[in-house]
DNA sequence: ATCGTTCTAGAATATTCGTGT
DNA sequence: GACACGAATATTCTAGAACGA
């Protein structure tokens, strides 16, 4: 062929470009194969070869087949048929106008509307004309070609797929939101509940401690009154006042309060403080977020998952709104606890269990210590250990536990006072 | 120009614009057949016009342009170009092969691979052949045509109007989310507030209990000290242990624990402890959510609604929120009670009122108690008020309220205690 | 057989298949115009071909068939019949007035009522006139045409851009939701944390108060015991009144109570009361909302800002789930506090400061009050009983449980003490 | 990994028909 | 019966996807 690319396009078309058209890539139903050659076109920098080829095609094509529009802003294929069979093969490995158009489309070209306003304007000569436009594809403006980017998503800016993309994004966002909200709900639910339980537990403990202290003091008083003749009481008292010796448990109320949890090695062995520690552990656990209670076999649920949490994102409103009930339950559980229900472990997770155990250990030690101080102390000790125990938090599900607890308590404490709670 | 499409279109457009109007798309009832008369394929009813047209096209088309395959399973367009320009317009309102193909596609036809397996098999004669296949489109089998269904979504199952449906779904989801969030916000708000109130109430009670205990003990001490000479103290003690006489208050701490709050008329006057009450009011205000107190004139708002809480995007709360209110009231009642705060009536329900009374009763007692104690008592009062002091809970927005409350408190109470805040 | 389905296909092809190919529907890029000829309306770009055609129809149509109304706001088809048969085909691929009307409907045109108000107004000449109106379709206002949007769902103005508008709305809504959720998360997080801190702080204070009281009483006891012979106790007392020595813990209950926290340098070393102080500090911060902690340098972070709060709406799940840590932090912070770590004030607001001061004053007073003892016991009893009373919190649902619990407890405990509840 | 080729599906407009008010 | 609109099909252009080079 006479490919006379005067300028930069030299060599785009090989002289013997005689390959059996209809080869190349492309989707084909199962089957096929073809032979194509390569193109000797060295990479003329960043301009896609397709654009360079197309540009040259238009420039060198017979004007009765294809050409620039008069204003040079677009190009017109006047005879698509001949263009496909005669021109295209000179530059590409095929002879299909549709494939050519597809490529134009990839590069953002748009087919211009050729329809006349009035049918009477119909011109058979121009009827089959096909006009393509691309902002950066103009006669004499090879420099603009590099601005044209191939795009799988359609070349031009904002082609209209925006909508689709937006919709996709929205869909994802909404789904994410649903998930987020659902989780938030669950999480807050859980956290509220835990916080409340935690607080109640602490309060309960405090009350116990106070009560014990009271009784303690009363006894002391009585004792002091009764033992005016002897200094025994004095010893006792002094002991109480002393800062707790390392390894020993102070009966000082403050100590009780101390969140030893963190001050783990504050002088006590892990064992002795385990109770408290575990307690804290329990906290942590409880404060965790994901309500993974689902399975939670073995151990039993300390805090049975709130029934309401089951809600589904799609329409949990009704369910979620019943929350008050859950709150109620927890509160109820609490009060119940404050009534001395608690020391059992309703499904404490292992650590909780551990804490229970530790707590016991602690209790014992504490108890023995108390032994030094007099009977009343015992009760106090029990109370304290109890105190640390966060278990108090049981819900309605606790009936059984409750019973158990009571029995435990009865067994564990000798004085009526301790049963106080 | 001369509208002389040289070739195929010759005469298509006559001077008299004689197009067979009434072509083009359009709805056809399922079961049209239109003008068609009898057919050997009796089931002419439900067959789409496109299929009938196409079938006839193949049957009546010159075999050098298009025809059935030898086995009659498919049809081949041997000369797409001529087919498009000469045949298609006879049946359809266009002359484009691509449009014809699109329709075939709608009806589930598949283009068959025309490429030769071996290059050597390449036959220029068949190179441009286009073959389409449809299971129910076979030579002499008009009866199968009715099985072919057009699909908006394309030949395959399920593609189509997803967009629209998706949009609908999204819309619904978003609305639901909005509602959900709004409710969540309200609920959490409410629950937080309640939790806090609950806790504060409990703490307050505890403090009071403690304080009482303290004083109690002091008395005991005093008594014991004073009664060294006699067993009076014993009497005293026993008295403590006794169940509280009606109308009297037991000094037993355990008893204290008992939920008297609700035991409405326990006998005191109103008024003196307003300080504490207001303090609690502050709390509520800070944690409160829905300002449902709207009406609530007379009595003054102990818990002014939070300005920020107005949010509420849509307005779903009505039903769900009602619950909270009731709860609120009860809680409010509590704090109120426990603090003896309440003489105000923010639409307090009867029980609230009752509680108010109780609170007042307490107040009086406390007050008188303080009175008896002299200076120190003042401090105590202060301490309590302080304790109750919710200030910590107030947001930046509360400054004003706080001030107001304080002033009120200052005005209402003479002792330093009021300055508690 | 002759594949001449004689029947059913009859008429598929009209004898005068003369239609102007290349008409019909189809997608047209916004911005066509192409080969179109002159239209006096230059801005031919984004205007739908239908509108352009229609506009030209009206302009160039014989006035006895169709024309603009005198005011140019609408157009009138005076002779629908001729319009359909003579005019429409010149521009469209059909000759049906109904189809034309359908298109007008798609573009939001409305047919104006042609019926006379009074029968006598009936004018045979105008009876068949059909008038259409579109806000943006006026004589000489081609520029308005581009405002007219086709609607898939039919003519209504609102309908057309519904899809697009909906999408926009949805987008906005979703964004709003994201923001809202994100903020909610943060806020609730913050509030939970603050509430917890607040509560813990209060409890700590209470415990301290109690402890102090205890020690106090013990001292009293000791004193009373020791000073049976003399007024040594006086000495003791005076001691108590003294401001606490640095590093020592005041045994004044008031002091304990006092939120000294804010009164940082009240004479104590960081160690002793700091805990409370910081704790109070935490309070304030805590109930605020927006986590403005960001800067907060200087003073050291008692409660380091929650790292997790940074999450972005777009994908906070992972972040939000890390909550456990935050909780941990808060707890840790608390314990820290209780250990007297903190007494610093991270931006305490004035009121806090104020309260602190007041608190101190109160402390002293309270202390002295306590010193006196007295018969205040009654009040104490009431207070205690009040305190324990959880009943307020229970709803109707609790009745049963409560009863059950009570009975259980009653059965289990013999002494008055146990009746603690 | 990018680009080319081909086939299929999506999307928007056009045209027609039917229906409910 | 008129009219607005839903619905189905038609036509055109653009984008997606698969496969190969």
Image: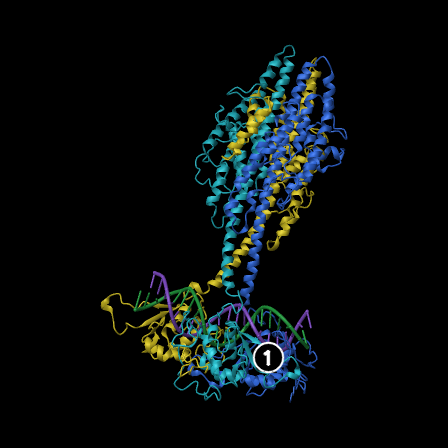
Chain colours: A blue, B cyan, C yellow, D purple, E green
Q: Nearer the viewer, residue A91 or C295?
A: A91
Residue C360 image position (x, y, % from top left): 63, 31
Q: State the image quarter where residue A279 is shown.
A: top right
Residue B309 image position (x, y, % from top left): 51, 45
Q: Note whether A401 is above or below C64 in the view shown.
A: above
Residue placed farthest to the top in the image?
Answer: B229
In the rendered image, the quadrant that contains the C terminus of chain C is top right
Q: State the image quarter where residue A221 is shown.
A: top right
Q: Secondary structure at mark 1?
A: loop
Q: Note whether C302 is above or below B313 in the view shown.
A: above
Question: Could one spot residue A119 in this view of the protein?
Answer: yes
Q: Residue at x 72, y 12 (%)?
A: A229
Q: Note whether C67 is above or below A234 in the view shown.
A: below
Residue A394 image position (x, y, % from top left): 60, 36
Q: Chain of mark 1?
A: B
Q: Note whether A44 is above or below B268 in the view shown.
A: below
Residue under pointer 1: B114
Circle 1 crowding by C-alpha within 10 Å: few under 14, some 14–19, many from 20: some
Residue C91 image position (x, y, % from top left): 41, 78
Q: State the image quarter where residue C95 is shown.
A: bottom left
């Amino acid at each position: 062929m006479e490919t006379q690319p005067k300028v930069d396009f030299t060599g785009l078309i090989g002289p013997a470009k005689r390959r059996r058209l209809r080869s190349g890539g492309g989707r084909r139903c199962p089957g096929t194969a073809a032979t194509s050659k390569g193109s000797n076109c060295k990479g003329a920098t960043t301009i896609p070869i397709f654009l360079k080829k197309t540009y040259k095609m238009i420039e060198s094509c017979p004007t009765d087949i294809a050409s620039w529009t008069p204003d040079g802003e677009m190009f017109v294929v006047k005879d698509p048929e001949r263009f496909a069979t005669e021109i295209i093969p000179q530059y590409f490995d095929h002879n299909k106008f549709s494939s050519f158009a597809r490529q134009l489309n990839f590069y953002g070209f748009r087919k211009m509307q050729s329809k006349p306003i009035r049918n009477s304007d119909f011109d058979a000569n121009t009827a089959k004309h096909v006009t393509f436009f691309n902002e950066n594809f103009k006669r004499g403006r090879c420099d603009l070609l590099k601005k044209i980017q191939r795009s799988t998503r359609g070349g031009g800016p904002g082609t209209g797929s925006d909508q689709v993309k937006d919709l996709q994004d929205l869909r994802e966002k909404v789904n994410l939101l649903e998930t987020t909200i659902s989780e938030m709900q669950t999480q807050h639910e859980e956290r509220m509940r835990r916080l409340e339980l935690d607080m109640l537990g602490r309060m309960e403990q405090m009350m116990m401690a106070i009560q014990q202290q009271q009784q303690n003091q009363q006894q002391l008083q009585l004792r002091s009154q009764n033992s005016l003749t002897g200094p025994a009481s004095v010893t006792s008292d002094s002991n109480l006042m002393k800062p707790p010796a390392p390894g020993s448990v102070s009966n000082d109320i403050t100590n009780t309060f101390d969140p030893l949890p963190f001050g783990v090695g504050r002088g006590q062995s892990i064992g002795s403080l385990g109770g408290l520690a575990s307690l804290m552990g329990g906290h942590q656990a409880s404060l965790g977020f994901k309500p993974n209670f689902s399975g939670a076999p073995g151990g039993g649920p300390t805090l049975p998952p709130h029934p309401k949490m089951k809600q589904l994102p799609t329409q949990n409103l009704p369910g979620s709104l019943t929350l008050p009930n859950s709150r109620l339950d927890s509160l109820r559980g609490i009060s119940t606890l404050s009534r001395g229900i608690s020391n059992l472990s309703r499904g404490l997770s292992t650590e909780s269990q551990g804490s229970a155990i530790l707590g016991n250990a602690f209790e014992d030690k504490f108890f023995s210590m108390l032994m030094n101080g007099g009977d009343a102390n015992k009760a106090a000790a029990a109370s304290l250990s109890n105190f640390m125990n966060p278990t108090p938090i049981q819900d309605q599900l606790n009936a059984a536990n409750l019973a158990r607890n009571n029995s435990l308590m009865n067994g564990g404490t000798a004085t009526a006072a301790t049963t106080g709670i």
